[in-house]
Amino acid sequence: MCSPRVTTRGGRGKTTALDRRRLPCVTTQGSRSGLSGCSSLNCNMSDLMRYIDYDHKATFLKMLNQQRMEGEHCDVVVVVENIEFRAHRCVLAACSNYFKKLFKKQTEEDNSIVELDFIRSDIFEEVLNYMYTARLAVRKKDINMMMSSGQILGINFLDNLCTQKRELTNMKTRENQAPGDHGCEPRTPS
C-alpha cells in the first residue's frame, strides 16, 4: 500500500500547501511511469480514491451562520436604519457583487463598518439570512422591494425573483382556468 504523498505539479518537484492530500496513493502529473514514491508497481491511477462529501455545503453554511449568530470571527458590521448586523466580509463578498466591489476598493479598517441607506433593515435582515442559509422568507407586499434590493446588491437569486414571481403567477392563472382549458386556443381540424 502506498503512503500519502505530496502531489507535484508538472513533475518538477514544485509543491504548494494546496497540493497536499490524504489519499492512498497520489501520482505525479507528468511523470513517465505514472508512479510517484510508491513502493510497489501495483500503485497506479486506479488505486487513487476520491471522495465527495455531499453534506459539506449545508454544513459549511450552517457553521458560518452559527458563527455569525454568536458573533464569532465577524469582521464587518453593516448598519441599516441604525440597526447593526454583524457578518463575515468573505460571505458578503461571495454572495453580493456590491459588497465584493466595496471591499476591493477599501482597506480592511475602512470597511469594518458599512452603512446602507438604500434598503430597509427588515429586508436586509432577510437578505443576510439568505446569504448564510440559502433560504428566503419575504412577505408578498415586500417582494418588489426584495427584488430591487437584490438588483442593487448584485445578488442574482434575489434579482431573479421577478422571473420566479411571474412563473408563480402564470401557474396560479392556469389553476384558475376552466377544466380542459390550458390557456391555448383550440386547434381546428385540418
Image: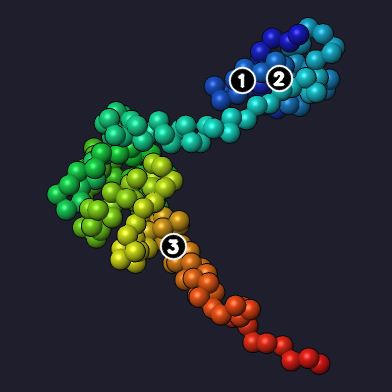
Of 72 and 139, which appears nearest the observer?
A: 139
Residue 143 visible in rendering:
yes
Q: In the visual, does 126 lie left or right of 186?
A: left
Question: Which residue is labeled 3 in the image?
Answer: 161
Asked which secondary structure carries label 3, the reply is: helix
Q: Residue at x 48, y 64 (%)?
A: 164
Give the residue type that dot 1 points to: Arg
Q: In the visual, does 68 lie left or right of 6?
A: left
Of 13 and 6, which appears nearest the observer?
A: 6
Horizontal and vertical percent position of residue 121: 22, 53
Counting other residues with Cα less than 10 Å from the Cα at mark 1, is it few (<14), some (14-19), or many (20 or more)? few
Of 162 and 84, which appears nearest the observer?
A: 162
Q: Verify CB contact (< 8 Å) between mark 1 and mark 2.
A: yes
For residue 18, which quarter of the picture?
top right
Question: Which residue is labeled 2 in the image?
Answer: 26
Tell me the CA gap for discs 1 and 3: 40 Å
Q: Residue at x 33, y 37 (%)?
A: 88
Q: Is residue 55 above or below residue 26?
A: below
Give the residue type that dot 2 points to: Val
Give the residue type that dot 3 points to: Leu
